[in-house]
Image: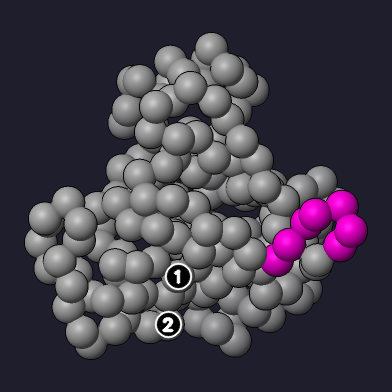
């Protein structure tokens, strides 16, 4: 598979300036921080960095595929947007959404924390040319603690039953 073409405009400028590379779940990213300290996760798993943070960018038409992380993940909208986060708890019994945008009286905010082990996907809302976010994970991110939704039949079944249109984000 070839690397996606860098888009024009501000999104392309951010990708170049921040030295972002294609992310396995979609979009563009670069790790910007990995804490030097080590902690053992609550589940007793292997030691992890205390905290990790990435820059992450999605352009219109891209999405972050359904996935889950074994740690809490804080999303922070930095520029562009709005960005919709699709969320499903481990029980797979409902789907929620949160729109990251400038704070307003309708309750939108520029950040949201996805609890550990919740399924999540993200996409810029229609009309948003791109969404540039920071994603901070604690205990720190490790691909050993990451699962793609496309590899989970139970998630696929839940999406089919609850919101079949969101299967497009697998």
Residue nearest the observer in this picture, 87 or 23: 87
Horizontal relation, residue 133 to residue 130: left or right: left
- Which-is-in-front pick, marks 1 and 2? 1
Is 30 placed above or below 61 here? below
The question of residue 92 being in magenta is answered with: no
- The residue at which mark 2 appears reads as 32
Q: Which mark is residue 52?
A: none
Image x and y of residue 118, in percent: 42, 42
Label 1's element?
Answer: strand
Marks 1/2 in contact by CB < 8 Å: the verdict is: no
Image x and y of residue 11, in percent: 70, 71
Residue nearest the observer in this picture, 160 or 41: 41
- The residue at which mark 1 appears reads as 136
Q: Quick check: can you spot residue 63?
A: no
Q: Residue at x 24, y 53 (%)?
A: 145
Earlier sequence position, callout 1 versus callout 2 = 2
Q: Which residues are magenta?
A: 104-110
Q: Residue at x 86, y 62 (%)?
A: 104
Quarter of the image holding residue 33?
A: bottom left
Q: Residue at x 20, y 57 (%)?
A: 42
Image x and y of residue 64, in percent: 53, 49
How crowded is the residue under tag 1: few (<14 C-alpha within 10 Å), some, or many (20+)?
many
Q: Quick check: can you spot residue 143?
A: yes
Is 9 placed above or below 92 here? below
């Amino acid at each position: 598979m070839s690397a996606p073409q860098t888009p024009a405009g501000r999104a392309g400028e951010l990708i170049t300036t921040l030295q972002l590379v294609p992310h396995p779940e979609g979009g563009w990213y670069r790790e910007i921080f990995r804490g030097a300290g080590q902690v053992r996760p609550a589940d007793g798993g292997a030691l992890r960095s205390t905290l990790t943070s990435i820059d992450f960018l999605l352009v219109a038409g891209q999405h972050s595929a359904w996935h889950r992380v074994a740690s809490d993940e804080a999303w922070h909208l930095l520029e562009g947007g709005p960005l919709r986060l699709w969320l499903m708890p481990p029980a797979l019994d409902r789907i929620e959404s949160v729109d990251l945008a400038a704070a307003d009286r309708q309750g939108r905010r520029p950040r949201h924390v996805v609890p550990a082990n919740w399924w999540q996907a993200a996409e810029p809302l229609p009309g948003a040319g791109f969404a540039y976010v920071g994603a901070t994970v604690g205990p720190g991110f490790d691909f050993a603690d990451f699962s793609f939704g496309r590899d989970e039949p139970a998630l696929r079944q839940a999406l089919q039953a609850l919101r079949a249109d969101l299967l497009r984000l697998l």
